[in-house]
Each structure stands twice: as C-alpha cells, then as structure tokens.
Image (cartoon, grey):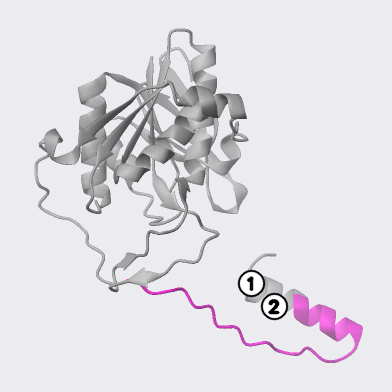
Amino acid sequence: MQIYVCVKHVPDSAVNITIVDKNSIDENITFLLNPYDEHAITEAVQIKKNLPGSEVIAVCLGKTDARNTLRSALAMGADRGILIVSENGCDSIETAKALKAAMEQDGSPGLIFTGRESIDAEGMQTMFRIGALFNFPVATNVVKLDIEADRAVVNSELSGGTANTYDMSLPCVIGAGRGLNTPDYPTFRDVVNSKKKPIKTIVFSELNIEASLTGANIIELEPLQQKREPKEITGDKAVIAKEIVKILRDKAKVI
C-alpha cells in the first residue's frame, strides 16, 4: 500500500511574528513541521509496520526551504518525499489540487493522511478538498484508527470529548488529531539516515493545474491582541468561591 502523508511547513508558534506589507510575515524566523502532521506521520509509519510491503511518502507544497520540513518527516520514518515548489501562497483549493496531482503522478494512494489543521492558517479544509477531488471518504480529528482489510474504522473526536465512529472504505483521507498517538520523534541516527532518503522536486507550474473559478486571498493580517480587564473579587471565602464558580461556568465555560 502507498500511504501518502500531506505535511505543511509552518512558522514555529513560539517565535515572534512580524507582519510585513499588511498581508505577509517576515519569514526570517524558524519554520518546522506542522505539529498535527507529526501525528499523521507517526500513524502512517505504524501502519506500514503492520502491512509489509507498504511505503510512506511525505508530500509538501511550499517554498524551496520547505525541503527542511520534508527532511523532518523522513527522519520520523517516511520513506521518501515529494516537494511541490511554489514561491507564491496557495489557498486550500490550489493546495488540494496540487497535492492530488503530485500523488497521482507518483502512484496510487491506498491511504492519505493529513493533520487535522495547520497551526498557521487553521483553515481545516485541505483534507476535505483532497477527499472531494479523489472521491474518497474523509474523517478528521481522528483519535483512533484500525485498518481491517479494505476498511478503516475511525473515532473522530468532537467538541466536549465525545466522538463519532465511522467505517470507511479504502482508500480514504484521515485528518490526524492529537489523541491519535504520541509522535515518535527521531533519534540522531534517524536524522542522519534521513539525509540519504530521496526527495523529488516538482515545480507547481509543471503540474498544469486548471485554474479555479473561485479562490481566497489574504487581504490583511492583524496581530491578535487580547484585552483583559482584571476584576477584584471581594467578600468572605464563601462569596469569593461562589463568584469564581460562576465565572468559570458562565464566562469561561469550562465547567
């Protein structure tokens, strides 16, 4: 089985992001493999171990330096990588079309993984668009996955900790959630060995993707500013405790 994992090159969430020209960011910062994609890679590699003869291929659309993210995926166990180079930003429609074209050009997907979302755009659309283009079933925020012959049985987590169980035919698209596994981070030897694994480079324009009738462009970026207004709670201990419970229930909605 050919198992494709679509990964994204994203800014490290721990760095300070500087907005440039209103609709882009200063890219002289650390970029890395999207954290949700770490769960996707880990699960794909585990499935490969259980299905002899399978292959894990990491696919990434991005600028030239996205090769570093593919190297991270290879170090985590992917067998080879495909980099679709585009120096221009792509929306989820173009991204899905490019990923589909690259996978079709390369082989025949038996299973496709993505992360449930990327930590930069947080659009949560790409896996559904890939599924629609291939006409494959899709499940996202998957926290449990069992492959049984030509079926995939998944638990898809919803808000509030509940989950739906789906029985899907293969091939299908899986959006990995954090609860799916614990990422298997590479050792130094894994990193060294990953440099011997091949990465195929494809220029976006070479895929001859038909222009979409619709699309999305970033008009303006604004820094997130959280406004907090501290409020002192006075009274005896019982009054204070009652007020804290009310805030947690009615405002924070955590109880």
Other residues around mark 1 within 10 Å, as few (<14) / some (14–19) / many (≥20):
few
Picture quadrant where residue 23 is located: bottom left
Tag 2–tag 1 contact (CB < 8 Å):
yes
Number of marks in the rendered image:
2
Residue 254, percent across and down?
66, 65
Q: Which residues are magenta?
A: 221-244
Per the image, label 1 sits on a secondary structure element best described as: loop
Q: Nearer the viewer, residue 246 or 183?
A: 183
Q: Nearer the viewer, residue 190 or 157?
A: 190
Q: Nearer the viewer, residue 178 or 204?
A: 204
Q: Give the main secondary structure of the magenta stretch.
A: loop
* Residue at position x 53%, y 48% in the image: 158
Per the image, label 2 sits on a secondary structure element best described as: helix
Quarter of the N terminus within the rendering: top left
* Residue at position x 49%, y 31% in the image: 41
Quarter of the C terminus within the rendering: bottom right
Q: Which residue is the site of mark 2?
A: 247
Q: Is residue 132 above or below residue 224?
A: above
Q: What amino acid does circle 1 point to? A: Ala
Residue 59, percent across and down?
34, 33
Q: Which residue is the site of mark 1?
A: 252
- Report whether 239 appears left or right of 220: right
The answer to if 233 sits in the magenta stretch is: yes
Mark 2 or mark 1, earlier in chain: 2
